[in-house]
Amino acid sequence: QVQLVESGGGLVQSGGSLRLSCAASGSTFRLYAMGWYRQAPGKERELVAVRTSGGSTNYADFVKGRFTISRDNAKNTVYLQMNSLKPEDTAVYYCNVEHTLFKNNFWGQGTQVTVSS
């Protein structure tokens, strides 16, 4: 059974940085895309960044130049380095993995990120 455990959220001032981690277990993840989504109160969940099994990355426009996604395949872990944080980045951040071929899709429990102005 696939499990995703996120960590690294918290409260930070505007302009600050946080690093989120998501440790995956229960499968072999080399064929999974690994990524991050977020959901702010009253809004739909949206893609933040994803890193495919082939190593390519895709970022939402609103985080380009500020956030960096990376993954350590040996540790089955995906990271999200968030710099220059803004109050509008406040949301619950969710880790997601999806199999490249079979599209099995799994979510973490979410970690709260709060950016104060």
Image: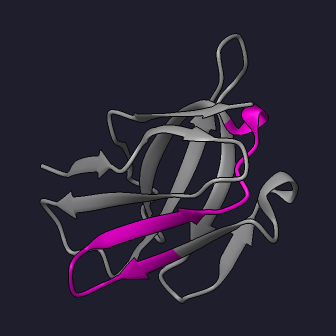
Q: Quadrant of residue 86?
A: top right
- In-front residue for pair 71/114: 114
Q: Position of residue 78 (x, y in %)?
A: 39, 68
Name the residue rendered at 46%, 57% in the picture: 103
Is 57 left, or right, of 2 in this rendering? Answer: right
Looking at the image, which residue is at 72% across and 70% down?
58
Above or below 93: residue 22: below
Residue lying farthest top?
42
Query: Is residue 82 shown in magenta?
Result: yes
Residue 41, by quadrant, is top right
Q: Left of 111 or right of it: where is 3? A: left
Q: Quadrant of the C terminus?
A: top right
Residue 12 horizontal/vertical position (percent): 55, 41
What is the basis of the colouring in this image? one colour
Magenta-highlighted residues: 70-89
| Magenta stretch contains residue 110 | no
Tally the marks: 0
Residue visible at 12% across and 60% down in the picture: 26
- Name the residue rendered at 43%, 49% in the picture: 95
Compared with residue 113, is residue 49 higher up or lower down, i.e. above or below? below
Taking the image as shown, residue 92 lies to the left or right of residue 109, namely right
Question: Could you say where residue 11 lies in the image, as x and y percent from the top left?
Answer: 49, 35
Where is residue 19? Give x, y as percent.
46, 61
Near-viewer residue (2 or 23):
23
